[in-house]
Image (cartoon, rainbow, N blue to C red):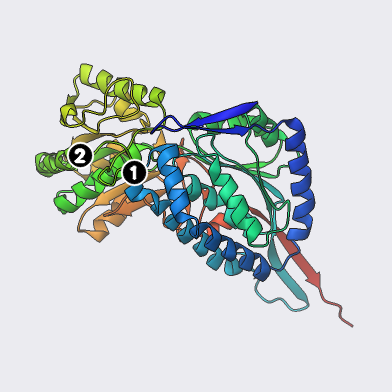
Amino acid sequence: MRQCAISPVDGHLVERLLADASALGHALEAATAAQRAWRETPLSKRINILTRAVANVEALSDQISAELTLQIGRPSRYAAGEVAGFSERAHKMIALAPSALADKPTAPKAGFQRFVRREPVGVVLVLAPWNYPYLCAVNAVWPALIAGNSVLLKHSEHTPTCPEHIYNALKDAGLPEGVFQYLHLSHEAVAEAVADPRVDYIAFTGSVAGGRAVHQAAGGLFKAVGLELGGNDAGYVRADADLDFAAENLSDGAFFNSGQSCCGIERSVVHQSVFESFVEKLVGHASSLVVGDPREARTTMGPVIRTEAADRIRQVIAAAIEAGAKPLVDPALFPIAKPGTRYVAPQVLVNVTPDMDVVREEIFGPVVVVIPVANDAEAIRVINDDRYGLTASIWTADVDAALALADQIHTGTVFMNRCDYLDPELAWVGVKHSGRGASLSSVGFDALTRPKSFHLRLKTR
């Protein structure tokens, strides 16, 4: 059986053969065997190989960028940022590894030597998404390999060349055969891989529904699952915020990648004293976007991934308007964004109510709602009244106020005066329906290793 990736730009097909049960079994056997030797490879050698592999990916930046523009519709002016971000995260995890994986001794005790060592879990199955295909894959693949695991990568059908480039980069860097493999798999085969006893850990990035399916497939098998799921992220603009700066950055957070970002801004919560001014500035930024063919240098927003996704986004916006929401961006500014196409015009909605899907659900498209609040307490209530908990941002000149508010916000990350960014030195983690477990930073090695205690009583006469 074959799967087809259809370009949202020109309809070009990229076909790949789906692996059958035999191919999956062979890959897992190879991964299990290769991991035994890889875990005994000195950390310094593993780091050298993975460092060379990063350079190999960097050398493909132009090719990868062109492929991303065609495969997922990201404008060419931004596509190179994917490889730059991949490089940043990979190098940071490499730099953190010696300390994160070092033996942790206890306090001295006469007659004893005691320490805790981190050992690799074994075979890691990485299930990566299409919207940031290299950035999301590197979060799990690099620390897993550094720690001494073998990795089987199953990537989205929309980005079939991504795992192939990663495989070749690692192979050319000298990674032993079987330590990293990729397969194109059906949903049924993914469930089989998740449940297979030869898989020791699953790292999944995707939707809540997908995460639930992975969790259920692993249920009762006593294996750990890391889930990086969706978000409905909010940015709170306080009365003392720099409105020009906040509007520019929250617009970018809402509309970059056509809004197809798990940590993109979907709700702007704004103090009522600056509400009208902020909305005017935000609408100005949204209206200035250039929606069109992502291969053109002037384009700042390309198509969404599927026509069905575009239709759903338009339906959610239409339903909100019918229920009383007010749209502020003129669709006529974006003639390419017509019903039945993959192009969706950016939209800013006000007069929304908490029961609307556009407020409560992850839309994963270029639409943001703006909600006025009377004070900080109301802002916290609005932000936390959500089933997701990935990130939130606070826009203010008052650091102390931001820290106090951050303690009350139920998300894995709280930003001040920035949004929609993963700092590889900080743990990336979601709460509530945004997931479980953590990646990046030194914490990112924890789930990919298991602690083993050494308790040595020294011989005495």
User: Residue 105 appears in which quarter of the rendering?
Assistant: bottom right
Q: Measuring 28% from the left and 47% from the top, which residue is drawn there? A: 297
Q: Measuring 72% from the left and 30% from the top, which residue is drawn there? A: 20
Q: Which numbered tag is attached to residue 286?
A: 2
Can the viewer see residue 241?
no
Residue 217 locus on image (x, y percent): 65, 30
Q: Are marks 2 and 1 in contact (CB under 8 Å)?
A: no
Q: Residues within 10 Å of mark 1 (few under 14, many from 20)?
A: many
Image quarter (top left, top right, bottom left or bottom right) of the N terminus = top right
Image quarter (top left, top right, bottom left or bottom right) of the C terminus = bottom right
User: Residue 370 appears in which quarter of the rendering?
Assistant: top left
Total labels: the figure holds 2
Horizontal side, residue 111 vs residue 370: left or right? right
Identify which residue, 171 or 250, lies in the foreground. Answer: 171
For marks 2 and 1, give the CA distance.
Answer: 16 Å
- Which mark lies nearer to you, 2 or 1? 1
440 is higher (above) or lower (below) than 43? above
Q: Measuring 36% from the left and 22% from the top, which residue is drawn there? A: 312
Q: Which numbered tag is attached to residue 75?
A: 1
Residue 71 locus on image (x, y percent): 45, 38
The kind of secondary structure element at disc 1 is: loop
- The three-letter amino acid code for the residue at tag 1 is Pro
- The three-letter amino acid code for the residue at tag 2 is Ala
